[in-house]
Image: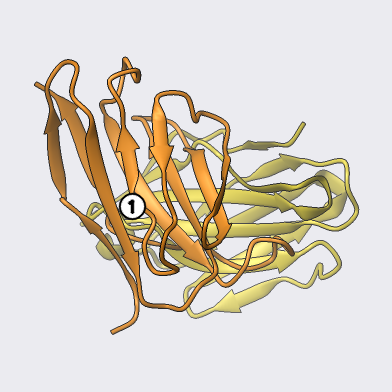
Amino acid sequence: AQKVTQAQTEISVVEKEDVTLDCVYETRDTTYYLFWYKQPPSGELVFLIRRNSFDEQNEISGRYSWNFQKSTSSFNFTITASQVVDSAVYFCALSEPYYGQNFVFGPGTRLSVLP
Amino acid sequence: DGGITQSPKYLFRKEGQNVTLSCEQNLNHDAMYWYRQDPGQGLRLIYYSQIVNDFQKGDIAEGYSVSREKKESFPLTVTSAQKNPTAFYLCASSIDRGAGNQPQHFGDGTRLSIL
């Protein structure tokens, strides 16, 4: 069965600190997709990134970066120079289409960035 | 603007009452989804639909029903059989579901409480 683990339930940092959110997954398949979403206090989930299992290149988008390591089944998310507006719940999700299992979400990590 | 509209934002249910949550999308997406979110937990799939007039049960379908009579609409009914309906309900859509690689786009959610 699929499983997505986000071991950090809550994280608090002071503005301008760097912070890494961990995501570890379990899958039976060689073809799968990983996603990160942000849920601000308004409630809507905002799509941040998609990564397929064949692309292990790290990605950077502004202050956001993602580290995908198949060897450790991890897809970690780093925010550099955090800002108060980064305060949200962040979800990692796994999609394994071969087995018809789409979008299993992790429990989420609540990030609080303090001014 | 293209997006997903959920209504109402807040809903209260009396004992023995059925209530219906609305979800409308103008993204021309084929697939639509309903999730339930409980505090401290990830999203759990209730129902999904890949095409008009077709829908499938997710992981926690008991006590819920859906319809998909139009491509843009996917209402969720929380029936009296759902004994613990208090939760945050999120509707989502994606271009399609089959490949599993398409990101889902979410509405703002409906918060349902029991009176």
The residue shown at (54%, 79%) is A61
- Does B89 sit above or below residue B71? above
The residue shown at (69%, 42%) is A24
Q: Is residue B88 left or right of residue A110?
A: left
Residue A68 in view of the camera: yes
- Residue B49 at x, y percent in the picture: 54, 54
Q: Secondary structure at mark 1?
A: strand
Q: Quadrant of the C terminus of chain A?
A: bottom left
The residue shown at (77%, 54%) is A97
- Residue B15 at x, y percent in the picture: 16, 16
Residue A18 in view of the camera: no
| Coloring applied to the structure | by chain
- Residue A60 at x, y percent in the picture: 60, 76
Q: Quadrant of the N terminus of chain A?
A: top right
Q: Residue A44 or B15: which is nearer the viewer?
A: B15
> Residue flagged by tag 1: what amino acid is it?
Ala
Find chain A in the image and tell me its colour: yellow
The residue shown at (88%, 49%) is A71
Q: Chain of mark 1?
A: A
Q: Quadrant of residue A51?
A: bottom right
- Residue A9 at x, y percent in the picture: 45, 33
Residue at label 1?
A88
Q: Is residue A49 left or right of residue A86?
A: right
- Does A47 sit above or below residue B8? below
Which residue appears farthest toward the left when viewing the image?
Answer: B115
Q: Is residue A18 left or right of residue A92?
A: left
Chain with colour orange in the figure: B
